[in-house]
Image (cartoon, rainbow, N blue to C red):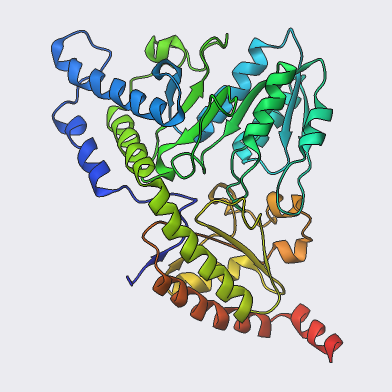
Amino acid sequence: MSDLIYLDNAATTAVKPEVFEAMKPYMMENYANPSSVYSFAGKAKKAVDDAREQLAEILHAKSSEIYFTGGGSEADNWAIKVTAEAYKNKGKHIITSKIEHHAVLHTCDWLERNGYEVTYLDVDEDGLISLEALENAIRPDTILITIMFANNEIGTIEPVKEIGAIAKKHGVLFHTDAVQAFAHVPIDVEDMNIDMLSASGHKFHGPKGIGFLYMRNGLKLGAFIHGGAQERARRAGTHNVPGIVGMGAAAKLMTENMESFAQKEIEVRDYLISRIEKEIPFVKVNGHREKRLPNNVNVCFRFIEGESLLIMLDQKGICASSGSACTSGSLDPSHVLLAIGLIHEIAHGSLRLTLSEETTKEDADYVVDNLKGIVERLRSMSPLYEDFVKQQA
């Protein structure tokens, strides 16, 4: 066991050594701009093309359907905004869910302020949308369904294939934010009828600042960034060659080992959940028990504040989260936890632990052993817990 127990892999992951080695030549040796015409640029261009092929193969897509971006948030913005612009003459209605990442929710809010209408689907207590509610929400002017593949906070995996079938049946485009799912669980865009998909390299042991948008061939969607002919004139800007190479290498590494990595994570994940539930009272596990990302543990401890919990875990060398890294500075409870029906007092006591394939049961034991004492200490200072104990006496 190391001095640092890193359990925030949903926020970001460490770049694998072999991924870094794959990137290095394109920083110092083959540093040419792949858009240049001279032969020196050929190696960089081939590296970009190879990475595009790697990502397409994983998704069962064509390389011409992969567009590189600066990350998952950009890919989400691109898919939603450009679809809204391209199909505005057909309609201005979009369907999403209440538990999406803010890259989707804030984009939808922006569209609402610009004349579009958005339906936000409820989820059940496990975080799953209702397929019946989805189909009932579709109208003649519906142009896009955007539902995430797996939730970044509670780990619930949505019924993506069924969503894709409903979208196809009604002639509506379907986009999924797969930032947490890509390279962690199998995805087949053809079988699942996915029209657009967003992913980000740093969520699966690739570098930060690089992602991609899968966009099905034949979609008449315009450019997102103007200024150059890169990405088939749809996303201008010099290619981040080291980042692209690293993302491709990481995706290949992770998918080749997906089954074995998932088995390791599930074993430690379930062990961690079991110990927490058995040894710490007044705790609730959030998210679906089976339809769940292999590495996700999300729990709420009653009568305590998640922020205090994180600070005290950090003092023990444990890196964790109370929700999405993008909103970690907020004092408001998670919108995801509120959407699955938790009251504010319970949602405030949330803890997200996201493992990697290198997390061990020894690490889990260290976390739970410290959690028990920290939760007990925080509850001893809580007026809410004191009142609760008096009521039970």
The C terminus: image quadrant = bottom right
Nearest the viewer among 206 and 237 is 206
Q: How many labels does the image show?
A: 0
Q: x, y percentage for residue 314?
A: 46, 69
**Residue placed furthest toward the right:** 391
Q: x, y percentage for residue 364?
A: 46, 71
Above or below — where is 223 with respect to 102? above
Image quarter of residue 200: top left
Q: Name the residue rendered at 54%, 28% in the picture.
A: 197
Nearest the viewer among 331 and 81 is 81
Nearest the viewer among 14 and 359 is 359
Residue 125 falls left or right of residue 292: right
Q: x, y percentage for residue 119?
A: 79, 31
- Taking the image as drawn, is residue 33 in sight? no
Residue 255 falls left or right of residue 279: left
Residue 250 falls left or right of residue 341: left
Image quarter of residue 237: top left
Q: Name the residue rendered at 79%, 55% in the picture.
A: 341
Q: x, y percentage for residue 172?
A: 70, 19
Nearest the viewer among 54 and 105 is 54
- Taking the image as drawn, is residue 168 in sight? yes
Residue 358 falls left or right of residue 121: left
The N terminus: image quadrant = bottom left
Q: Name the residue rendered at 60%, 81% in the picture.
A: 279
Above or below — where is 161 with respect to 34? below
Q: Name the residue rendered at 39%, 10% in the picture.
A: 228
